[in-house]
Image (tube, rainbow, N blue to C red):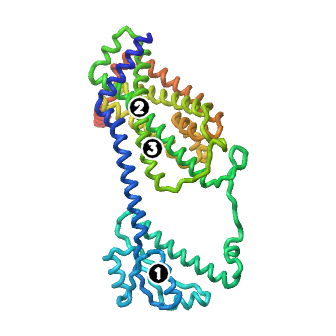
Amino acid sequence: MLKGLFNIIVKEVKELVRDPKILLGMIIVPLIMFPLMGFAVQTSMEAVEGSMGGISMAVMNLDKGPVAETLTSFLKTLNVTIVEINDLNLTETVNYVQQSNLTGLLVIPSGFSKNITQGLKAEMDVYAVFRGKGIAESTSSSMMSALLRLFEEGLVVQKVGEEFPEDPQTVLNPIEMSEKSIVKGKSVNIDPNILLGLMMSQSMGMPIGIMMLLIFAMQLAATSVASEKEEKTLETLLTLPINRFIILVGKLTGSIIVAVVGAIAYIVGFNYYMNSFMGIMPAEIGVDLETIGLAPTPISYSLLGASLFVSLLSALALAVSVSVFAEDVRGAQALVGPLSMLLVFPMIFMMFTDIYSLPFPLMIILLAIPFTHPMLASQVVFTGDYLTVIAGIVYVSFFTIAVLYIAARIFGTEKILTAKVKFRKLRFKKNKQHQIK
């Protein structure tokens, strides 16, 4: 029995790897696509940083007062290129700024300095130029507004300093907050924003990796059965003196092996892609997840592996059961394709929200989907919520047993060879019945 199972597994792996579509689509393309995307992102962000350092503004100073002159000098000290407009009206200035390579236009109206010195609200028009150049343009525009806000804060500090010369910052910021976190019932001296950022980078990657692994496995299992039906080799395989359940297990195991290799390729490529973002972000120093009890343990990995295994087995059996009704590989992929929604739907919620904070009917629907549980396990297992993970493993195990039973029944009968879904004939029959009526 074991020898026959081993031969089936080797046969499945060889056939799947020999398929150029699988080799290119699952292994080679991810290792090339993601690094290229990462390189594009990193290069683009470096270009954005360069554009942020080259902000240039046209200034139409209609006030000529001391505060307006101070504003212009302030921008120059921050390496902002200033182009003063003195002999053009507003319409001509707007057209000039649009045609030039300037970031924006600053219009300082008459009476600006007088209103500031008298403690009144002063108006100022800031125009950002839209040229449709993407994130670099929006970042430069935001930086321009940030610089003007910085000047405004300086004016506020100056005004407060006139009334409270000893310590104006205390008046502006009378409360000094020390943000800390509570982890597993203990207080830790870590900013929650830092902690949430670190956990977010972990919780977003795991659902994506799990979704990819399950989708690859389903496509592989469906392709394995449909290709043999298409090439008429399934009949020969079923006539061998091997239990059909062993054939089913061999096909599932072969698909698992190739799917894991494909998932590793995607995770490696995706990790490079994510590092292209992380490389341009300031690294948070001094956060030790192991010290605060958020680092993975052997038990965590074991439970996560068990949850992923039963979900993977369930996905494979489900794909095999569905692909039986296809005549060829294309039909099998068409039948299995909609099943990916059972993976994408929970992945989106797992990445952006807490499933238990959703409305009760939606939460029940998500928990009823078996592929939600390995994604949920990837998030809660590291916080020590083992009960949730174990409950998910039990539920998915029962679901997997049911699906395996259906797949085994199909393999145990001649339906594996005769079952077909012909959408064209179905539509033709319906139209014919309609005409008769």
Please indicate whether residue 327 sits to the left or right of residue 273 in the image.
Answer: left
Q: Secondary structure at mark 3?
A: helix
From this view, report whether residue 404 is shown above or below residue 291.
above
Q: Position of residue 63 (x, y in %)?
A: 48, 90
Q: Which residue is mark 1?
A: 125
Position of residue 128 relative to residue 416, above or below, is below
Quarter of the picture holding the C terminus? top left
Q: Nearer the viewer, residue 47 or 206?
A: 47
State the image quarter where residue 215 is shown.
top left
- Where residue 44 sits: x, y (%)? 38, 58
In the image, which is nearer the foreground, mark 1 or mark 3? 3
Instruction: Give the Cα distance between marks 1 and 3.
Output: 44 Å
Q: Which mark is residue 339?
A: none
Looking at the rendered structure, the kind of residue marked 1 is: Asp
Q: Which residue is mark 2?
A: 261
Q: Which mark is residue 271?
A: 3
In the image shown, does 322 or 24 lie closer to the viewer? Answer: 24
- Give me the C-alpha separation between circle 2 and circle 3: 15 Å
Q: Is residue 206 left or right of residue 50?
A: right
The quadrant of the rendering that contains the N terminus is top left
Q: Position of residue 265 (x, y in %)?
A: 40, 37
Three-letter amino acid code at the position of disc 2 = Val
